[in-house]
Amino acid sequence: MSVATQHVLQVRDKIELSDIERRIFDRLLASLRHFNLQTQVRVAGGWVRDKLLAKDCYDIDIALDNMMGTEFAHKVKEYLVSIGEGKDVRGDGKIKSNPDRSKHLETATMRWLDMQIDFVNLRSEEYIKNSRIPSKLDSRECLVLLSMKQSFGTPEEDACRRDLTINSCLVVHGSLFYNIHTDSVEDYTKRGISDLKSGRIVTPLPPKATFLDDPLRVLRAIRFGVRFEFTLDEDLKVAAACDDVKDALAAKVSKERIGKEVDLMISGNQAVKAMTHICDLTLFWNVFSLPPVFKPAISDGCERLCVAYLDTAWNLIHLLKESTFKDKERRFLLFAALFLPLKNTTYQVKKAKMVPVVNYIIVDSLKQKGEDAKMVLDLHRASHKFLSLIPCLASNEDLQPDDVDWMRGLIDDVSIASRVRVLTGFVLREIKDLWRVALLVSILLHPIGINDTEDESSQLHKRRDLFNRVESSIIKLGLDKVWEVKPLINGEDIMNVLQLKEGPLVKEWKEKSMAWQLVDPSRTTEECIDWLREVNSKRVKLE
């Protein structure tokens, strides 16, 4: 596994505001004075954490002690309009509460001065005696988890309701606040600053109770823990792995929220560590849930193999030139690598169609876009095709007829010397500008000669060198951007010359004509039509 250097975080004693932040807070205080409001305004969330760590942050979570967020947000906007600054406010909206899905508070949102600002009230709860609570909790956890009626709370009460002691230090909604009236940081659990400095992920209340209140906090603890290379508390890990929390994650948290967390992990700076934590806490199949019925059966330890492929892909990305993959390409590559062991596992959908379970995981379990699932599946298919071409592309050898198990009929009339170019051209035309991503996925699968004396680093360098050789060969063949090459003839030309009606045969001949074109990029439309007539003449004679 990847081993990262432990960072020692320097925590500031005082928050230093930017000019924009100072302007925003001045306007919030002015709004209070304008409407004669006796409200204390504090900042919670990741902004406090990032400012203490001297990092930039463009999301501000405002916590109010005696007003609803929507009410105060309307007052702020009204005040900004009155002083001629309201025209720059965008996205004046509201996110409704949904306690059944662990969204306890209604949130008002606006965007101003390129900052996302959310407004919410401080929270407390009023315990209800006859509420339902999960089983297997000790008395302290039961007290915490009794269903509650939300009401305005004090900062102390709100701090204990939040997910981690270091939050607003580590995960949004933590125990630290920034008071804009006094320009000071407030640590109501008395542990937030110390846990931040010592690099510990701890919950202010018993972790099982904290997670059952909102099970998504498990994934957020993992994501922020790996982001800052902090240590997960042992009690936290035990609670995260327990069956009650797993069941709650499935029952209370929307797939969209889970998918967002996973996407942030994959796009973050420690994707492998995050997925390793998910495996270690036995949460992998809870997060990446499978359809009820699929085949073939998944082997024990498959999730570890998924993470191993991700780890290799991650290390290869960093061994290659930084500019090799853009952010979008890197994201698709990591998802394709993570789900590589599942590429041949399918499930049945309507009309008896068999679909890869990877599609189900991305679209149904993570609620990502259908386009994302299609792209990952396309990468898997293209990587399979690349596998048969890699030996020839890496060594400049000719491709033999039995070397490929796809498009055999297409290359029957192509000379052996040109087959690698033609087939590689077709792969690139299918996957387009993600061909390097598909190539790297195939490199993960390609067997490399390993001897007993080679360590993991040597193996990675072998795969890196193989990728570079194949990439160089493709470029030398002049195939980069080959998907932009327009066909010399179209379906209508084929139907006229071959006297065919529109249908599968026309599509087949369009592919054959493209294969003919790929053999020699200097060929012309007239030559292609002559070739088609010659082929047709031979076909007629055979009939």
Image (spheres, helix red, strand yellow):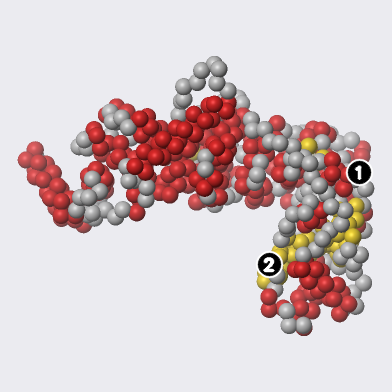
Q: What residue type is disc 1 on?
A: Leu
Q: In the image, is 237 to the left or to the right of 413?
A: right
- Label 2 is placed on what type of residue? Asp
| Residue 344 in the image, given as x and y percentages of width and height | 47, 33
Quadrant occupied by the C terminus: top left
Would you identify the image quadrant in which residue 422 lies?
Answer: top left
Residue at image coords 59%, 31%? 308
Give 378 or 455, whichever is nearer the viewer: 455
Pointer 1 residue: 143
Few, some or many residues within 10 Å of mark 1 (<14, 14–19, 20+): some
In front: mark 1 or mark 2? 2
Whether residues under marks 1 and 2 lie with C-beta atoms below 8 angstroms apart, the answer is: no
- Residue 71: percent from the left, percent from the top? 81, 71
The answer to which of marks 1 and 2 sits earlier in the sequence is: 2
Query: Which sits in the foreground, 317 or 142?
Result: 317
Please tell me in which quadrant of the rendered image residue 290 appears.
Answer: top right
Residue 349's x, y, as percent? Answer: 48, 42
**Label 1 residue SS:** helix
- Mark 2 highlights which residue? 114
Q: Residue furthest left?
A: 541
Considering depth in this image, is 478 or 39 the residue closer to the camera? 478
Q: Residues within 10 Å of mark 2 (few under 14, many from 20)?
A: few
User: What residue appears at the point 72 percent right and 33 percent down from the top-left corner?
Assistant: 281
